[in-house]
Amino acid sequence: MTPLDILIMAAGKGTRMKSRIPKVLQRLAGRPLLHHVLDQAAHLGARSAIVITGHGAAEVEAATAGAESAAGTFDLKFVRQEPQLGTGHAVQQAVPHLRDDGTAVVLSGDVPLTQADTLRALVAASAGDRLALLTVDLSDPTGYGRIVRDAQGAVQGIVEHKDATDAQRAITEVYSGIMAVPARLLRGWLARLTNDNAQGEYYLTDIVAMAVQDAVPVVAHRITDALQVAGVNSPLQLAELERAHQLRTARSLMEQGVRLADPARLDLRDDARTGVRGALVCGQDVEIDVNCVFTGRVELGEGVHIGANCCIANARIAAGAVIHPFTHIDGEKLGATVGAGALIGPFARLRPGAQLGREVHIGNFVEVKNSTLADGAKANHLAYLGDATVGERVNYGAGSITANYDGANKHRTVIEADVHIGSNCVLVAPVTIGAGGTVGGGSTITKDVPPGALGVARGKQVSKENWHRPAKQPKA
């Protein structure tokens, strides 16, 4: 195969985004647009990727240099286009890095959803000696360059919208901004570009007429899926692409057997904090209700039910578990696991390091962080478990907390098997409650409780008979 060198145009300001963040760093499914495009270089097995930056160049380069898609798969380079004088001028900046033995594939940093199979077909059409254009038919081609063909249907050129006649603007086949061209030919054509047009810019599309003049075949790989060539120029367009992308993800999941209450109300995102790519892996008979957001890698075992309005990130949920509505699970780098048959929520929060065994119950407004709960343990109401090791069949009362932080260091609480913790207790770590022990409601426990013992630490109750409440004084 001819070596592939990917050229990505990422110099535009994106004025209509009305954002301080460069357009190519705006996020789709939790991932910058430019990183989606770089993924294609990896999928194609490219030799190199050359990113042409301009507006916000330093920020774009810093955010992209360590992109996972580029790590160890191809040689990543950056060149700057300053000032920005058109698409042809942009590609001219990459010429010193092009080698004549390769095919250059030109992509746009704000067109994130092109499929790898489409680009492979485009490269195949180029065949190492042709100029291949990716084209698409649009019902509204406004703003796009039109494909001009001769009477026999051969491509003769591309006319930019601003330079097109009324007859040419009626053409619905448009150039997507994506092409594959032998680098040795591209180099010569770029040197011949002029800016004799309405915009005073150097158009990359002018090389089509040069190819025709030089008797180099120009071919078009024509597709009908406009989503693959859709660009982002405004917050509205970004939102539209987001929903279209998420709907594709939802359909793919349903084809695998996942039951989605509404495929239009599902989101799968990359985790920008950890760099974990978005992946939702589901067993058989998984059911997901509406408005659920999955971030990073999430695994759902057979028969898992996810209630409405849940946010789940970097977690493994075993078979038969039920995650009730409005639950927030975020494993971050440590991960979070939920055992088989567990019941979580509603309104529960599992933080990094939460490791729950089989048939654990975590109820409403219970928070678990960096804690292990063994099989059958229950914390059903209004509680906090942080830095704790909880044994089997423990019952953890409403309003109880582990006081794990002394202001400088974290300490661990150990609650052994079959312990009962009463309501409204404070367990001041480090402390151990022995197997089968009981902590009386309202206790603040600062010392270990032996196995089988009752620990109580609270003021003695006093009752005063015939007590009269203070009464309001009459107004003068």
Image (tube, grey):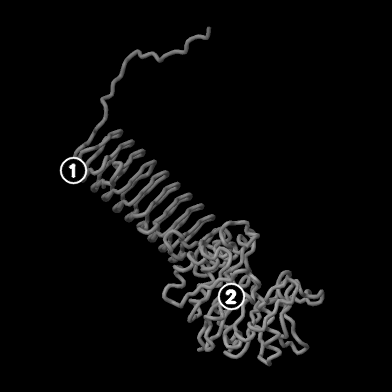
- Percent x, y of residue 209: 71, 85
Q: Give the residue type at disc 1.
A: Pro
- Please identify the quarter of the rendering in which residue 206 is found: bottom right
Front in this rendered view, residue 261 or 472: 472
Judge whether residue 340 can be spotted in this image.
no
Q: Give me the residue at 20% from left, 38% from top.
A: 447
Note whether residue 212 is visible. yes
Q: Position of residue 333 (x, y in %)?
A: 37, 59
Q: Amino acid at mark 2?
A: Leu
Residue at figure coordinates x 40%, y 63% from the top left: 301
Q: Earlier in the sequence, mark 2 or mark 1?
A: 2
Figure quadrant of residue 243: bottom right
**How far separated are the C-alphas under marks 2 and 1?**
68 Å
With 182 as the anchor, is 215 left or right in this view? right
Residue 347 on image: x %, y %: 45, 46
Residue identified by numbered label 1: 451
Q: Which residue is mark 2?
A: 107
